Image (cartoon, grey):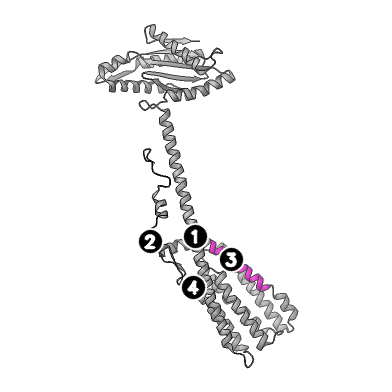
Amino acid sequence: MDPVNRRAPFADERYWSCMAETEENQESRSFHFLLGRFRDKDLERQYRSETHELDLQHVIRALVVVSLVYASFLPIDLVEQSARDAIVATVASRLGLLVLAGVLVLFLRHFAERVHLELAVFLYIVGFCVASDVIFLYQDYLEPSTEGYMMAALTYLIATLAAYVLFPMRYSRQILCSACFAIGFAVVHRLVPPQAGFHPSVVANFFVTANVLGLVLSGRIKELRRDQWLAMNQVRHRADDLKHEIEQREVLEDRLREQANTDPLTGIGNRRNFFTLGQEIFDQAQRYNRPLSVVLFDVDHFKHINDTYGLAAGDEVLKTVVGAICGILRKPDVFCRYGGEEFAVLLPESDAVGGSRLAERIRSVVEERTIRVNETEEHVTVSVGVAVYTERDKEFGDLITRADDALYSAKRKGRNTVVVSV
């Protein structure tokens, strides 16, 4: 994010496109009840792709539940059936449907990309109709023309409604499954006709009613699921936008924090950063009685350079000096611009020997460096003051004061020299 960009939260274009949809977008996202899908084909395709795994789980669960319920009637059949052929047909039909469901569930779990979901449901419903017809044709404990006929009608009516509700398929596939149930019942009607005086048109009317009710329920379920999916998508987009906004704000805060603690000319820490880190390091040295040194130095006769060559030349001299010193410091050392042409180096775990050695190296490195200023080669020097932590230093400012006194002592001694305060 651009640091100067102060847009309101959620200013991301995706958020506003989601929150301020045009009427055309709302129309494309709306649900077409008669078609059972979104009006926008691309949106419908995305919905099916993202909900395929959920539909797969629903179908597997429905296959298992329906098959177990279907098989649960087997004990009743075994108790009530008397003919051997009826028992064999009943057991084979109910267990066969259970096996078919198991095979389909196995394929759907392990080969979902190769097995079409709606095809698996259609095969199961065909197996259901075949198994049910066999049972109704061979059962011998119900009166075929009355009880058996009505039981078959009730079974296929319930199955028709269940198919609409349990299996997430398109209308055309659901109607095809309903046709399978109708054919299954037609076979029963043909082979085991009802008694005289019974009007099959009544059952036909119930089938029509079941299909109409099933289509309405299925459409409502489709609409609710798509509404839920849209709401979840909107929540997910808002969460992504919020996360993106938080990340942008964190980046901005890091940049602002870096700018607040960094000298813009030289790229090293500024006075504020020096005192913040210095206080932490000083507290640790004081708490654990560890050695600590501070080096203060400034460029000699820097005003003369500015007056002679200009401020831009003076800036180049400072950057050159900083570049030369950065190459000789350790990773734990804290190097900051203290102010103007004055710099400070904090040396953790450095006693008087280590501090004075680094100070002398700073002085010599700068003295040996040739600086090109406005087509002229110049040599600059620095005066260096070093202060080493002692028990007399009660706070970090005491250590800085002694280093500053040592620096001015070095200037009074003629500059380009090092003074150590122990």
Q: Is residue 329 above or below residue 35?
A: above
Give residue 60's mark: 3
State whether residue 356 appears in this view. Answer: no
Picture quarter with the N terminus: top left
Whichever of labels 2 and 4 marks the residue nearer the N terminus, that label is 2
Q: Residues within 10 Å of mark 4 (few under 14, many from 20)?
A: some
Closer to us: 323 or 144: 144
C-alpha span from label 2 to label 1: 20 Å
Q: Position of residue 271 (x, y in %)?
A: 42, 23
Say which residue appears at 69% left-offset and 77% top-offset: 91
* Residue named by callout 1: 229
Q: Quadrant of residue 256?
A: top left
Whichever of labels 4 and 3 marks the residue nearer the N terminus, that label is 3
Give residue 171's mark: 4
Name the amino acid, label 2. Glu
Tell me the mark number nearer the camera, choosing from 2 and 3.
2
Closer to us: 162 or 417: 162
Q: Residues within 10 Å of mark 1 (few under 14, many from 20)?
A: some
Name the amino acid, label 1. Trp
C-alpha span from label 3 to label 1: 21 Å
Tell me the mark number nearer the camera, choosing from 2 and 4.
2
Name the amino acid, label 4. Tyr
C-alpha span from label 1 to label 4: 19 Å
> Left or right: 281 with respect to 158?
left
Whichever of labels 2 and 1 marks the residue nearer the N terminus, that label is 2
Q: Is disc 1 placed on a helix, strand or loop?
A: helix
Which residue is farthest top? 413
C-alpha span from label 4 to label 3: 20 Å
Q: Is residue 52 above or below residue 363?
A: below
